[in-house]
Image (cartoon, rainbow, N blue to C red):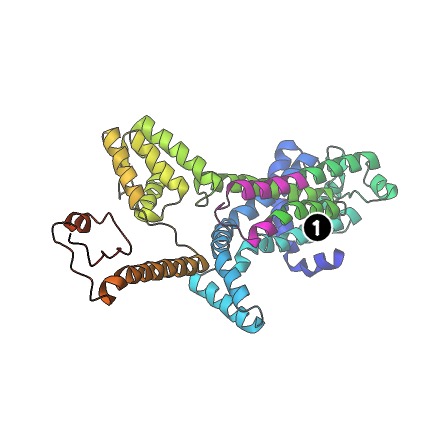
Amino acid sequence: MDTIASLFSFITTPVSWIIVQFHKLYGAVFGPDTGWAWGLSIVSLVVLIRICLIPLFVKQIKSTRNMQALQPKMKAIQERYKNDKQRQSEEMMKLYKETGTNPLSSCLPILAQSPFFFALYHVLSKIASGDTIGVLNQDLVNSAREAHIFGAPIAAKFMDDPGKVEALNASLTDVRIVTAVMIVLMSLSQFFTQRQLMQKNVDLTVKTPYMQQQKMLMYIFPVIFAVMGINFPVGVLVYWLTTNVWTMGQQMYVINQNPTPGSKAQDHYLQRLVKSVTSHGEVRGRRRRVVVQAIVAKGPDRNDNERKFVTTLAKAGFTPQADGSVKRVDPATAEAESAAATRRQQPKRQPKAKRQAASQTGGAQQSTAKTSLEKADEPQDANPKQPAKPAGGSARQAKSGQRKGQQRPKHPSSKK
């Protein structure tokens, strides 16, 4: 880990400078040598970094949704070119280019945080050994060494030996209890964040291997963080716990305000929107009007949640308009219009195999019916000696078409 952290030593000076500036602010309130001053400085560093990474987080959300939507097409390409890996890669890249999707965008926030994470690790390691680094002079290093968070020095680790912990004026028991609690909280926050994404913000109509991979990561990531956490200093655990909590809150906000179409979160969002419309008689807020406008524009391509939203509005006596507003109408009329629009929706396209099977079945039935008609007409055309039927006797039957199939010829001696 020291080797990896040294690779990011170019950013240790900016990181140490940011921490020092926040330490001056919090030190004036809590005291320069307290754990609150140094701990809040690390928390503020995380908040500052995450605010700067909001544009990357937005790209991550868009990329994740695009990847979910492209999974069926990607699976079809893999099956079609399973014996030609080069052509498979070319078709994948072509698909990404056409849809404007970048698979690496989902990893951008983590990759962008990595330099700051390892730089902070390097800074805390130097503090633990009493060495200066970046803009941290010896006085600041000594102050940071004396800072304790719930009895644990910010530079101590779970795996430190008792002598090293005593040199930091702390007990091994306090250090291990504090680090263990932080590791558990860090792992739980990571698990809850991924679980929240899988259960609420995934299109349930798309069943792909991508969803199975995300479920596996939901259980693997917390274990990885727990194993790595025993080698992190307390200050790094504070950093990573803070960034996990930030991610969880940020994701919760996005799920509530901009859910994935077809997900449970969208259903809950539209239910809240119906309540707001029925309470105020209008769509309040620009974002909500944009949502209603998009649903109206989809027409017959709406998903189940959106069709349910339109139907519920109709029962309440409202009809969504193309500009994102709603129009108050008679509930019976609105519900009838909504039902008519639902009936006009095109049925879902069946798979190619089912269409071919239906075509073959229909062709066979048509051929059988044609053969039956030819057999029914054959005796009348082939027997020229058969006398013509009286117009009045069988006109009713011929007109009504009640008797079908081959007719039995009359005996020549019959006078009727």
- Residue 156 vs 374, above or below: the answer is above
Q: Foreground residue, 262 or 237?
A: 262
Q: Residue at x 79, y 49 (%)?
A: 129
- Circle 1: element type: helix
- Which is the main secondary structure of the residues drawn in magenta? helix
Q: Label 1 sits on what residue type?
A: Tyr
- Position of 275 with respect to 142 (left or right) is left
Question: Can you say which quadrant of the picture contains the N terminus?
Answer: bottom right
Position of residue 248 measured from the top left corner of the image (x, y, whole percent) = 57, 40
Stretch of the chain drawn in magenta: 187-214
As drawn, the residue found furthest toward the front would be 413
Q: Residue at x 44, y 43 (%)?
A: 258
Report the number of numbered marks.
1
- Look at the image and say whether residue 208 sits in the magenta stretch: yes
**Which residue does the numbered mark 1 point to in the structure image?**
121
Q: Foreground residue, 256 or 229?
A: 256
- Look at the image and say whether residue 103 sits in the magenta stretch: no
